[in-house]
């Protein structure tokens, strides 16, 4: 199934119209509070990654059944990555699959999670362990929602924005040339970057929808990032862990990176987050449970130069040594 993706500065009309065609709208309590006009009859779930679990999934499915949704009905997700991931999974399961529409309201969801059809819940301490590829029929991305974005969600979104910008030489230049304006959240600079990230993500998932090859490049920073996130009990936002993950994975593999590029990445990430302090034991255990691994090795997608990502596999013992060295190295910056 291909997704129709519409994006722009202010798509209120399209959103209202799309929501009116859905039998049920699911949102979270933050969005419901900020946008009462869009969420009058919505089913409201509690916000936050800690609620992306089987309880919330079954609450949504129960409500779909209670409201008498049929196979021909559509459901809408109005919210950030958590809402989109869980509603998409509910849509894939209900009556063996009904159509759904995704309306991302956060920066992270706009540039990353709403594109490419990944749906999931976290399970047994592992992020996104249960899920399916189940693309929405439509995604409508209106940057206007960013006007009410919470401070922590800006940082969260910037994690995925920076990751995506490392994937092509053009997006990397756009990021570096406009970094101060992006940090100041200058609208034009942010919108241009969002559009670039959407284009990149769309091209990648179109070429490899099921993550057999190319799509793996979207996991830059995510092996250590996910491990740090789970070890920390999802206390900070996903994007913060992605940024810490990028810093750590790069510092672990500094020997195979372009030196100037390495220094620039560490400095860019350092404008947003501090390096991690989590012990190697905790991180390694989680990193070995990562979905990207095969055999007895940890897989890291390493940006070695602007627009060039290498698939690096690290053995258990080597991981300990490299991680410890990376943490020491990052303490100096
Ligand atoms: N967030 C990574 C992906 O969609 O593949």
Image (cartoon, grey):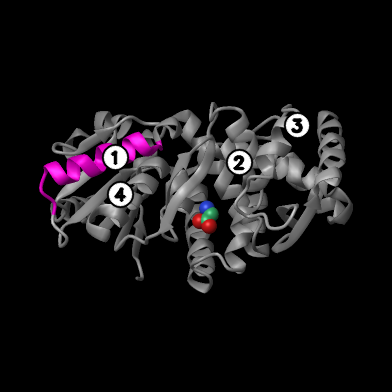
53 within the magenta span: yes
As displayed, is residue 153 above or below residue 170?
Answer: above
Q: How would you rate the neighbour count of disc 3 (Cα within 10 Å): few for under 14, some for 14-19, many for 20 or more?
A: few
Q: Which residue lies at the image location 54% right of the left edge and 26% below the top edge?
A: 235
Q: Are marks 4 and 1 in contact (CB under 8 Å)?
A: no
Q: Residue 312: name its quadrant.
A: bottom right
Point out the stretch of residues depicted in magenta: 52-69
Q: Looking at the image, can residue 108 be seen? A: yes
Q: Secondary structure at mark 1?
A: helix
Instruction: Give the residue number, with chain letter if any, for mark 4.
Output: 90
193 within the magenta span: no
Instruction: Give the residue number, with chain letter if any, for mark 3.
Output: 281
Instruction: Give the residue number, with chain letter if any, for mark 2.
Output: 226
The tag earlier along the polypeptide, 2 or 1, is 1
- Residue 47 placed where, x, y %? 36, 31
The tag earlier along the polypeptide, 2 or 3, is 2
Q: Which residue lies at the image location 25% right of the left edge and 41% below the top edge?
A: 60
Q: Quadrant of the N terminus?
A: bottom left
Q: Secondary structure at mark 3?
A: helix
As displayed, is residue 165 above or below residue 283?
Answer: below
C-alpha distance separating marks 2 and 3: 15 Å
């Amino acid at each position: 199934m291909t997704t129709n993706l519409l994006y722009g500065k202010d798509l209120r009309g399209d959103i209202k119209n799309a929501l009116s065609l859905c039998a049920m709208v699911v949102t979270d309590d933050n969005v419901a509070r900020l946008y009462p006009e869009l969420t009058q009859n919505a089913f409201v779930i509690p916000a936050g990654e800690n609620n992306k679990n089987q309880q919330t999934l079954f609450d949504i499915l129960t409500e779909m059944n209670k409201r008498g949704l049929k196979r021909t009905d559509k459901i809408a997700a109005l919210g950030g990555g958590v809402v989109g991931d869980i509603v998409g999974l509910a849509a894939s399961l209900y009556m063996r699959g009904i159509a759904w529409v995704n309306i991302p309201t956060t920066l992270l969801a706009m540039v990353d999670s709403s594109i490419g059809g990944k749906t999931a819940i976290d399970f047994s301490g592992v992020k996104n362990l249960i899920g399916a590829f189940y693309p929405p029929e439509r995604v409508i991305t209106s940057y206007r929602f960013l006007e009410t974005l919470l401070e922590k969600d800006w940082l969260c979104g910037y994690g995925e924005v920076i990751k995506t910008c490392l994937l092509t030489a053009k997006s990397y230049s756009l990021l570096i040339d406009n970094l101060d304006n992006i940090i100041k959240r200058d609208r034009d600079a942010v919108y241009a970057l969002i559009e670039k990230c959407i284009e990149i993500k769309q091209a990648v998932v179109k070429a490899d929808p099921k993550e057999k090859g190319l799509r793996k490049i979207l996991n830059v920073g995510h092996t250590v990032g996910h491990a740090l996130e789970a070890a920390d009990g999802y206390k900070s936002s996903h994007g913060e862990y992605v940024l810490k993950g990028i810093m750590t994975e790069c510092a672990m593999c500094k020997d195979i990176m372009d030196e100037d590029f390495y220094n620039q990445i560490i400095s860019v990430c350092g404008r947003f987050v501090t390096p991690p302090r989590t012990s190697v034991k905790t991180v390694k255990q989680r990193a070995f449970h990562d979905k990207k691994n095969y055999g007895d090795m940890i897989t890291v997608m390493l940006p070695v130069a602007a627009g060039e990502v290498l698939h690096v596999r690290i053995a258990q013992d080597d991981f300990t040594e490299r991680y410890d060295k990376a943490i020491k190295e990052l303490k100096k910056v």
